[in-house]
Image: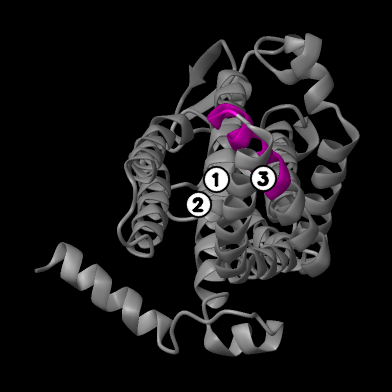
Amino acid sequence: MLTVAGLVTGRVLQTRALHLLSRWASPALTCTTGSRVRTVSGVGGANGAGGWYGSLSDAAPVHLCENFLVGVHQVSGLPWWLSIAVATVSIRTCITLPLAAYQLIIISKVEALQAEISDLARRLRYEVSVRGRERGWTDNQSRVQFKKNLRRLVSQLYIRDNCHPFKASLLVWVQLPLWVSLSLALRNLSLDRPALQGELAAGGALWFSDLTVPDSTWILPVCLGLANLLIVEVFSLQRAGASGFQRLVLNGFRGFSVLMIPIAASVPSSMALYWFCSSLVGFSHNLLLRSPTVHRTLRLPTQRSDTPYRDLLSAFINKYWK
């Protein structure tokens, strides 16, 4: 449930961020000249939007991300589409991968405590029952005393093992602002930075040759949606005997993955490319953190399987091909 809760928080916040970004990502008014779509000056851009969105797109973290993206492009000499991919891999590997590993350590410690917490709750329930009879407590008073003391004891266990569940959400609170900042940085570079618009317009590849306009073929948006659906399905394979709430959450993630397709089709291709690369890198990191070698390196207290990849493949085949 801890992993599900963290994923719920991240997806809910990301959904809201996507709504805000898609609302302002494309200009409100465009005109077509030949095969190119050009922004009408002063309409729909971040500078024209003003207000809270103008402040957000002009924030220091967004400018820092812009400088980072431009720096990667200039230092590497790579075309813009590949520079975006390299920047995505670099940031997610250097920042979010260590946090994901830390999250895994916290979750494993919390899971390892469950047996001790269950035994503690059983003994505490008996002690509260005996004391309640001695003092004439009502059932409600006994229940309040039990919950109060259990919370205190469980908190002491978390302090003892340095694994408060809130620490497992650290990844979400770092990854989401980073994702928003990079998305807005790419939007600014694609639409509001005349000095770089020409480079980005010619910096694409294959069917998305112009990174400043949406992908009219919808190939990138569909690939993004499929990548997110794959992540959700692989996650669902690990939740044997999921509760009704967990199934509801998974269905919500599936709906969110489909919703991202039209959203990604309405933003500059540079943003859709970043989102797609970010999903692929996140998925690869998720698989990497299931490696027994990584588990041994991190000295995790629990190890579910010595063959996690074979187990995932078998579960996938059994679910979708049998």
Front residue of this view, candidates 43 and 23 = 23
Front residue of this view, candidates 104 and 265 = 104
Q: Secondary structure at mark 3?
A: helix
Mark 2 / mark 3, whichever is N-terminal: 2
Which residue corresponds to mark 3?
131
Q: Quadrant of residue 292?
A: bottom right
Residue 223 is inside the magenta segment: no
Q: Amino acid at mark 3?
A: Arg
Please, is residue 131 above or below residue 268 in the view?
below
Q: Amino acid at mark 1?
A: Ala
Q: Residues within 10 Å of mark 2 (few under 14, many from 20)?
A: few
Q: Nearer the viewer, mark 1 or mark 3?
A: 3
Q: Secondary structure at mark 1?
A: helix
Which residue corresponds to mark 1?
5
CA–CA distance in space, label 2 to label 3: 32 Å
Residue 315 on image: x %, y %: 26, 72
**Magenta residues, as a range?**
138-150
